[in-house]
Each structure stands twice: as structure tokens, then as C-alpha cells.
Image (spheres, rainbow, N blue to C red):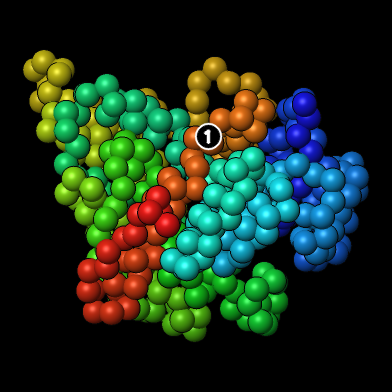
Amino acid sequence: MTIRMGIIGLGRGTFAHNVMQHRSDVEIAAVCDLQEDVARGFAERNGIPQWFTDYQKMLASDIDAVCVATPPQLHAKVSIEALQAGKHVLSEVPACWSIEDGKALVQAVRAAPTCKYMFAENMNYMAICQTYEKMVRDGRLGTIIYAEAEYIHDCVSLMAGRFDGVTEGSATGPTWRATLPPIHYCTHSLGPVLAMMQERCTLAVGMHPGANCHPEHGSIDMEVGLFHTTSGKVVKVLCGFSMVREPAFHYFSIYGTKGVLETGRCGWDGPKAYLTDIPNLHDMIRLPLDYNHTNVPPESMAGGHGSSEWFMCEDFVRAILDDTTPAIDVFFGLDMTLPGICAHISAENGSEPVVVPDPREW
């Protein structure tokens, strides 16, 4: 069987083409972008038979699956319509923009039992995150009791003067990124942490300092979420996209009863660990890990984020061909997404705690 796949959104969505074009079991059969010159040009350059500027028309075409890479406000809406059209869905992050969108997404997935929905959280496929997850599951850290993660990335250059299709005047004025609550984009941090803990967040508290670095955009500098998990563990996540800081980085720190795992915040400060199962250890030890897997073909780097998207796309395709539950299904995707929405609600309401709903109960 060859999966005929369409891509909606040719900004971020190009990763799906770059990876899937190397597979014999996938054909990129259609692409869609609101800008006609972008859609037509991409299709012509890459020998893709169909291009669209209306994603609903593409959903009515002869394709089997779609990658949803629109601005995040539309992820749930477009995914729901794709499922209703009988298409498998690989959705970019976050899964939804509101709790109500999340509920509608779950209902759409339940109503389309023959369609696969997979949440495209590439950080869960980063080699270092998968190695840490295995170390945790092997018991090297004992019982996990606390974790923190950060994602800091100066995206100011993307906050104005770029047509985004959802924000009025974005071609010359602010884009959706300018109004993005930073903690809404917590899935890159929460995803790997929750995979290690094998739990979900149940309570959220949020805080932010407002817009100081770039008040002309009104963009919140950074936002922090504090979360309780099912068994009472504590997780802290910090996200910031308009801070004056280089380089951009992802940071993780995982504390257990038998050790700690950390990553670095800059190039010279790499992954490290302290583990009590190593006798006579007096200091953290360096781990020669990064975001790329070993022993992979050159084309595995085609997605643009190391080798992560190669393995992510493999899981999506195998779920379709083998008729199995995707590795990151709608519930796990919402477990990563809903805490950030709840943390922002908390931050906007004096940091009052907000209960994080369990999407399995919808």
C-alpha cells in the first residue's frame, strides 16, 4: 500500500515532504498553502501533481492522509475537518488552542475510528530525550520526583511583517506569534518529561512578567507553568520567545531518588548525569549525547531537526499500515497541550490554580 499524503501549510509543513519523499510507501500527492505562488511553486519544483489554496478542497481530493502545519490556532479545526473527511492526520504542535477545541478534537477522533491521529511532537524523538527516557525506565534514577524544562528561542523576527493567514494585517503588522502566550507552546518541554514520568498533569499554576522586551508587539516575554502530576510529582516549564538571549535552547533537568539527568543551556555545557549506581562518583559526568541518533542514513536528517522527524514519520506511517495506535495519540498529545492552556488561564487570573482536564474523560 502507498499512502497518498497531502500537506497543509508550506512553512513548517515542508518537513513532512522532505522526510516522506524518501519513503517508498508514501507519495506526496498534494500540497496546500493560502499563497498561490507558494503552493504552485512548491508543487512544480518537487513534481507534486496537485496544489491547492483551499485546504477543504484538498481534503475532498483523492488523498489518504494529511500533515496539518497551519498556524496553531487552526490545528484542531483543520484536524477535525480532515478526520471528518476520512483522512489520517499528523498534526503539528500544539494540538489545540483552547480547552473547547481539545474536546472537539477528541470527539472527532472517536467518531473516526478507522483514521489515525498522531501528534507531531518531534522533541519526543530527539535522541537525547529518548536516551534519558530509557535510563528512567531502566530504573537508573529510581523514582522521579521533580522535573523542569525550558524552551527559550528569540522569535522576534517572526512576530511582524509575515503573512500568516490568520492575523489581520500580518503582512505588515504583528503575526500570530506576537500574541502567542508562551506557555501555550510547552509541548516541546512537557512531551519528553511526561514520557519519562508516564503520568499526566492534573493541576496548573502560571505566571508571567508581561511585555517588556518588545512592548510594541504586546508579546509576553516569557511564561512559567508549575504543574502537579497524577501522583503528586512537580514539573516546572519555562517558555520564552521574545527574550534577548542567544543561543536558543531546550533544557531538561530530571531529579530522581537515585540520581539526576541534565542537559546544557549552551554549546559548551552539555548533557550530564549523577547516578548512585556508579560507585565512587564525586561529580556529574558528561554524557556524549546530542539530538541526533547514531547509525542512521543521511536522509534521516532531512526534516530539519536532526534525525527526530525521520523516526516520528516512521511511527505515523507504521500506525496507518499496521493499523495500530500512534505512538503519540490524541490523548498523549492533549496531555502535553492542555497544561499550557491551563497555566496561561492561571497566569491571567492572579495565578489561581487551574485543574487540568483528562481528555480520556471527554
Q: Is mark 1 on a helix, strand or loop?
A: loop
Q: Nearer the viewer, residue 91 or 60?
A: 60
The residue located at (24%, 40%) in the rendering is 254
Image quadrant where one finds the N terminus? top right
Q: Position of residue 108 (x, y in %)?
A: 58, 55
Q: Position of residue 14 (x, y in %)?
A: 70, 48
Q: Which of 317 and 219 is in front in this view?
A: 317
In the shown orientation, is residue 362 left or right of residue 11? Answer: left
The residue located at (53%, 56%) in the rendering is 107
* Image quadrant in which you'd find residue 310: top right
Does any portion of residue 301 appear in the rendered image?
no
Residue beneath disc 1: 325
- Answer above or below: position of 321 versus 253: above
Amino acid type of the residue that numbered disc 1 sits on in the rendered structure: Thr
Number of other residues with Cα within 10 Å of mark 1, as a class: few under 14, some 14 to 19, many 20 or more: some
Does any portion of residue 261 appear in the rendered image?
yes
The residue located at (76%, 34%) in the rendering is 3
